[in-house]
Image: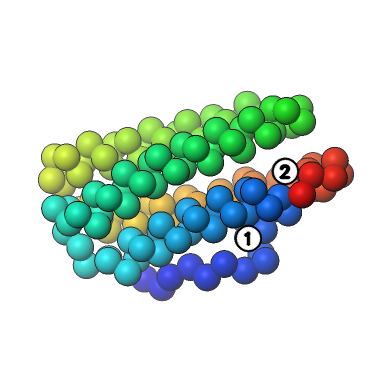
Amino acid sequence: MEKINWTNEYSVGVKALDDQHKEIIRLINTLIEGSNDTVDSAITFNVLTEMMTYAQKHLDFEENLLEQHHYFDLMNHAAKHVRYLEKVAKFSFGTMARDENIPKDLLEFLQNWWLHHILEEDMQYKAFFKERGIK
């Protein structure tokens, strides 16, 4: 699997959100670099833990920003975040249960979910923030 390279295509036009998305991509790239790791790997465990913590922080920040500016589709957007966190929690439990498929499945899920979420879901609020002068 190839690493993800940040391009302007991923920018939602809000520096804080872009910076957070870059960090998430960095974490995914760390998993890609260690893609041959096993479920017992410290890298897999540490990155999963860091990803859970950082993603929660990012999603909370994003939702708070959307709420502050009365984003019309906040509830739908937030529901997608909840489903993401539930799925990552399942991966965590799978790691604790030593499920050997976790590293590969986790990497595929994170890469697919985040790229789709940024390019499809988050892009829906790009114009919303631009209209309000939020950078």
Please give the label number shown on residue 125: 2
Q: Quadrant of the N terminus?
A: bottom left
Q: Is 36 left, or right, of 32 in this rendering?
A: left
Q: Nearer the viewer, residue 67 or 106?
A: 67
Q: Position of residue 112 (x, y in %)?
A: 46, 55
How packed is label 2: few (under 14 Cα within 10 Å), some, or many (20 or more)?
A: some
How crowded pointer 1 is (Cα within 10 Å; few <14, some 14-19, many 20+) is rated as some
Residue drawn at x 61%, y 32% is 63
Q: x and y percent of residue 99 in the render?
A: 15, 47
* Quadrant of the image occupied by residue 111: bottom left
The x and y percentages for residue 101 are: 20, 53
Mark number displayed over residue 10: 1
114 sits to left or right of 36: right
Q: Secondary structure at mark 1?
A: helix
Which residue is painted at 32% across and 69% down in the image? Answer: 33
Under mark 1, the amino acid is: Tyr
Q: Residue furthest bottom?
A: 2
Indicate the amino acid at tag 2. Answer: Tyr
Q: Is residue 115 visible?
A: no
* Rendered view: 96 above or below 30: above
- The Cα atoms of the two marked residues, 2 and 1, are separated by 13 Å
